[in-house]
């Protein structure tokens, strides 16, 4: 939802803190490599796509982030995949600077 680079960096730092907290105490398998995929969150499968549910989601997000509902709807539609076969295939949650 960032509107500028400063806000974008602040949001990334907040996200990084959450990711680090999730990894604290994580123990791998001794002698084996462990890969942690931080961009593997299939949110689109669980979030509303249309209708009343989407409207309610936008309302909730706008209140939570203290931004207008119109801004949330605008950002959601600008990030929608036009062709799921192309683009960021395999990355369900991508971090993209626009």
Image (cartoon, rainbow, N blue to C red):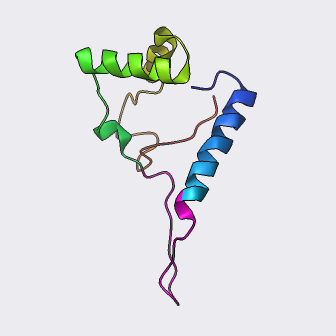
> Does 2 sit left or right of 73 as displayed?
right
Q: At 50% from the left edge and 85% from the top edge, which residue is drawn? A: 32
Q: How many marks overall?
A: 0
Q: Nearer the viewer, residue 96 or 2?
A: 2
Return the residue found at the far right: 6
Relative to 16, residue 53 above or below = above
- x%, y% of residue 67? 55, 15
Bounds of the magenta span?
22-40
Quarter of the image with the N terminus in it: top right
Question: Looking at the image, is 66 positioned above or below residue 33?
Answer: above
**Residue visible at 52% across and 13% down in the picture:** 71
Of the 4 image quadrants, the one containing the C terminus is top right
Q: Position of residue 38 (x, y in %)?
A: 51, 55
Magenta-colored stretch includes residue 82: no
| Relative depth, front residue between 20 and 49 | 20
Q: Which residue is drawn at 43% across and 19% down?
A: 77
* Residue 24 image point, x, y percent: 57, 65
- For residue 65, which quarter of the picture? top right
Work out whether 14 lies above or below 66: below
Q: Does the magenta stretch include residue 36?
A: yes
Residue 94 on image: x %, y %: 51, 42
Left or right, 11 with respect to 88, comes to right
Q: Residue at x 55, y 63 (%)?
A: 23
Q: Is residue 25 left or right of residue 57?
A: right
The kind of secondary structure the magenta stretch mainly shows is loop
């Amino acid at each position: 939802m960032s509107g500028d680079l400063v806000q974008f960096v602040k949001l990334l730092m907040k996200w990084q803190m959450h990711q680090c907290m999730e990894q604290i105490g994580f123990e791998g398998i001794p002698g084996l490599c462990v890969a942690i995929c931080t961009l593997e969150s299939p949110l689109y499968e669980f979030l509303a796509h249309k209708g009343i549910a989407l409207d309610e989601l936008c309302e909730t997000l706008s209140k939570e982030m203290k931004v207008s509902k119109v801004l949330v709807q605008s950002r959601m539609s600008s990030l929608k995949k036009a062709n799921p076969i192309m683009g960021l295939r395999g990355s369900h949650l991508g971090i993209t600077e626009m």
